[in-house]
Amino acid sequence: KAGVTQTPRYLIKTRGQQVTLSCSPISGHRSVSWYQQTPGQGLQFLFEYFSETQRNKGNFPGRFSGRQFSNSRSEMNVSTLELGDSALYLCASSSRLGRDEKLFFGSGTQLSVL
Amino acid sequence: GENVEQHPSTLSVQEGDSAVIKCTYSDSASNYFPWYKQELGKGPQLIIDIRSNVGEKKDQRIAVTLNKTAKHFSLHITETQPEDSAVYFCAASSHDYKLSFGAGTTVTVRA
């Protein structure tokens, strides 16, 4: 069974630009979560989608948005990029929505904002 | 929201020795506590998890213990091997369905 796939693997953008990251969950998984990982802040929850609906949201500004498609694939968008948005963005999938569902992570997209 | 603290931030052990990582959480409603291992250039990989109705769980050389009263849980790795070198994260899932992570522990196993 293929794991969680994230594209692209690396991305370099400049301040003010916008970026879209993609995530394909494990086949059959309907829940997709996004996390931001930085050396200073660790892993921070961005949002979670289940059946094309955002079910939960972390404490990030509105510049961070996402969506989920009918095939459970998800995209995350960051508009008006800032230097502080440089991070590893991780996508994780689980089979169901639930507090104790196992999360399976992709390898992430490393975003560098110059 | 949930606050998870993890100690130590770095841990160096001799191959064959044991490694212990400790975490505390703040939300008494948290009921799920996974541990992840992250190797360089990869995403976190779930290695073991425990639910609040269980006090201890073991999987080969890895074990996790949970003390709900004290709100802390620990990861124990026995007979450490070089491939155990990685960053380990604890996490707790609270009532708002979010998974909150500890800051991570960098484990180095010396040959």
Image (cartoon, rainbow, N blue to C red):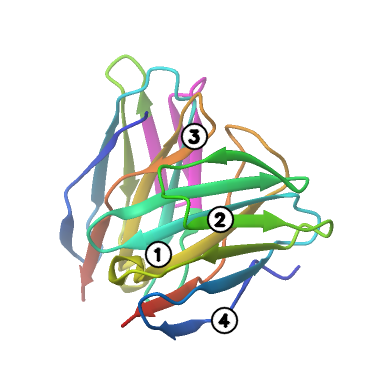
Examine the rendered structure and indicate whether residue B76 appears above or below residue A106. above
Q: Mark 4 = which residue?
A: A8
Query: Which segment did they paint magenta?
Result: B47-65
Left/right of residue B9 with respect to residue B56 in the rendered view: left
Left/right placement of residue A76 relative to residue B34 reads right
Do marks 1 and 3 share a subunit?
yes
Q: Are marks 4 and 3 in contact (CB under 8 Å)?
A: no
Q: Is residue B68 magenta?
A: no
Find disc 3 in the rendering and name its residue: B50
Residue nearest the viewer, comparing B68 with A3: A3
Q: Are marks 4 and 1 in contact (CB under 8 Å)?
A: no
Marks 2/1: CA–CA distance: 26 Å
Snapshot quadrant of residue A54: top right
Quarter containing the N terminus of chain A: bottom right
Give residue A59's position: percent from left, percent from top: 40, 42
Mark toward the start of the polypeptide (1 vs 3): 1
CA–CA distance in space, label 3 to label 2? 31 Å
From the image, tell me which residue sits under label 1.
B38
Residue lying at 54% horizontally and 32% vertically, measured from the top left: B97
Check disc 2 and report the residue beneath it: A65
In the image, residue B60 lies in the stretch drawn in magenta = yes
Distance of mark 4 from mark 1, alpha carbons?
Answer: 19 Å
Q: Viewer-nearest of labels 1 and 3?
A: 1
The amino acid pointed to by label 4 is Pro
